[in-house]
Amino acid sequence: MSTVRDGLAEYWGDAWDAWNRFWFAPTAPATLSAIRVFAGAMLFYTHLVWSFDLYSFFGPNGWLPMDFYSIERGYRDPGWPSFAWSLFQHLQSPLLIWLIHIFALVCFFLLMIGLFSRWVAVLSAFFAIMYATRVTPGAYFGLDKINCLLALYMMLGPCGARYSVDRLWRMRKGDSGEVPKSVMANIAIRLIQLHMCALYFYAGLGKLEGQTWWTGEAIWLSIANTGYQSLDVTWLGHFPWVLHFLAHTTVFFELTYPFLIWPRFTRPWMLATAVGMHLFIASCMGMITFGLAMLIGNLAFVRPSTVRKVMDPLARRFALFVLGEKAG
């Protein structure tokens, strides 16, 4: 009996140690910093395009007038969260809407270049959610969800530790330039990883409810839809087995992503599949920003050492060109 008890104690002890290592082992912030650069650029660009018709989207009498959000008048679904609040819901003046919009764009841009990173990360998360809430559900898509996801988790860790103006600033003040490992960088990355697993898994479950994914016709129906078509690949219709293979592979990939992305042996294959799938979506289905945003989320599964091999030389060249200093 004591042997069984000792074995269980050892098992739970090992499980607890693994849990602590998963969440609280300090990690280099290179991956989180790289995500900040690309996610900041995506936030800046995707919100900048609202400027072309800002008041129609966010004005009180625009395409989604404020009456739409009234449960009493029967426009809003009673199941919609009561905490879904946006500053745009309380702004009447076009001038104020534009001022808030410009301030948000400045925050997104500062997040991209890494200036006052911790502060603008919080503001960027607030503004990303605020925009998404105001246009829900009329113009709220997967891209907005990924934007909010990345913005939310970047504010938890030292996203400006590398590849940022903040770091160049610290080095100019005499900082050694060493970037310590961080527990919060690990927590932020883990949360992004788990959220990506949930997104793919539930996307796969949702596809199982659609008959065209079972029959293999879903990919054809997507690429043949001229409303989304950016690159004509309808010639694939001459090879139905390819379309069926792509459809079934997509479902298999999404359902197995939460399980096969963690082992070192299968992770490169899953990431390569994600790159291929989202580049196909970006190039053939007119959803370039969504495809790129999903790849930014997948970057959370790339080791910091691998990120540094790619990003550090680029950061040094940028620093030498702009400031005449070496930085990574």
Image (cartoon, grey):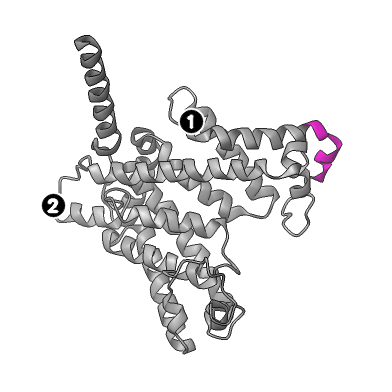
- Mark 1 vs mark 2: give the one in front: 1
Q: Is residue 233 visible?
A: yes
Return the x and y of residue 51 as percentages of the image width and height: 53, 75
Q: Is residue 230 left or right of residue 255?
A: right
In the displayed structure, would residue 122 be above or below residue 307?
A: below
Amino acid marked by disc 1: Phe
Q: Which residues are magenta?
A: 234-241
Amino acid marked by disc 2: Gly
Main secondary structure type of the part rendered in magenta: helix
Q: Secondary structure at mark 2?
A: loop
Q: Is residue 144 magenta?
A: no
Return the x and y of residue 288 as percentages of the image width and height: 61, 53
Quarter of the figure with the C terminus: top left
* Tags 1 and 2 touching, CB below 8 Å: no
Return the x and y of residue 252 as percentages of the image width and height: 62, 32
In the displayed structure, would residue 187 be above or below residue 137?
A: above
Residue 259: mark in rendering: 1
Q: Looking at the image, which is closer to me, 229 or 321?
A: 229
Q: Quadrant of residue 7?
A: top left
Q: Secondary structure at mark 1?
A: helix
Q: Quadrant of residue 213?
A: top right
Q: Residue at x 48, y 30 (%)?
A: 259
Q: Residue at x 70, y 35 (%)?
A: 246
Q: Looking at the image, which is closer to me, 203 or 283?
A: 203
Q: Looking at the image, which is closer to me, 79 or 87?
A: 79
